Amino acid sequence: MESSIPVSAKSERRWRSKPLQTSKPSLVLAFFSCFAWLYVAGRLWQDAENRTLLSNLLKRNTAQRPKFLTVEDKLVVLGCKDLERRIVEAEMELTLAKSRGYLKNRLPENGSSSGKKFLAVIGVYTGFGSHLKRKVFRGSWMPRGDALKKLEERGVVIRFVIGRSANRGDSLDRNIDGENRSTKDFLILVGHEEAQEELPKKVKYFFSTAVQTWDAEFYVKVDDNINLDLEGLIELLEHRRRQDSAYIGCMKSGEVVTEEGKPWYEPEWWKFGDEKSYFRHASGSLVILSKNLARYIDINSASLRSYAHDDISVGSWMMGVQATYIDDNRLCCSSIKQDKVCSLA
């Protein structure tokens, strides 16, 4: 049977079967091409929807936003700029007025209404719990009553210096106010909080308030553990009259304490260099500043940095000005010299 089939017919069947075998890869390729086309078309359709959504949102926001500033808007902008400019000008004028001596008395009840010029204002530090110590001072070197007024007639003002309680108006403040009504020998620093952690800032408030309250040649800060030879101090200051930029005290320097928990620890010890030594400064027991230096502290009080100890703070402020350092051994209160004007109480 097979031999009876012509050769031409067999070759024709083989020729027709070849396209069927070679078409399988083409079908697979066509399938993947169709799938890729559908994927790309889907992504393009999705991107088109996103673009339409974003375009609608943009048109909506553009429609809600004003196309131009109204007159009111412009006035608000200009008003803010003008107010800012006037604030800056007022601050500059205030600084200039202070530097020329036009100072407002914050505490007129403590000052001199007659405009009298004094030799010195002496501020003796005190605290809420130092009532007995104040009584001892009033009974020893510090005048009281009529004697205090006579001393002021000689040109010397003495006041106990204290701040306000953290709870303003409480019994601590009321007790001080009552004592002051009786003795009239307090300088109350209204802006200062009387607390141990705020003590380094007290010296700034004292000099600033004192120079605004009294017109004196010298301003003297005294610790509450110091007894004064008042006549000896007055004689010393009389001798120093008309010495501008005088920074007077028992000058010293020493090692910066870097270990927390030890007495006199300085939290910012790293600022004092690798040698860890303080610069030259007057001992905090008794510090004397001339009028222009006290005024400098008042004018720049907002920007002056306070350290852990007030004598270091004052010394750092004096390094930035043309201060005349006067080292007077008579102001070394802890020494054993016979002619000193102060001693430890």
Image (cartoon, rainbow, N blue to C red):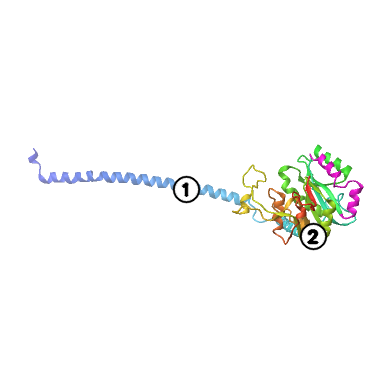
Q: Residue sitting at 80 percent across and 58 percent down?
A: 291
Labelled disc at residue 97: 2
Residue at the farthest right position: 146
Say if residue 238 shows up in the picture.
yes
Quadrant holding the C terminus: top right
Labelled disc at residue 47: 1
Q: 10 Å neighbourhood of mark 1: few (<14), some, or many (≥20)?
A: few
Q: 10 Å neighbourhood of mark 2: few (<14), some, or many (≥20)?
A: some
Picture quadrant of residue 162: top right
Q: What range of the chain is rendered magenta?
A: 129-155
Q: Residue sitting at 67 percent across and 44 percent down?
A: 263
Amino acid type at circle 1 is: Asp
Picture quadrant of residue 16: top left
Tell me the SS state at disc 2: helix
Magenta span includes 143:
yes
Magenta span includes 15:
no
Q: CA distance from mark 1 to mark 2?
A: 68 Å
Please state the total of marks drawn on the protein image.
2
In the image, 6 versus 186, the foreground residue is 186
Amino acid type at circle 2 is: Ala
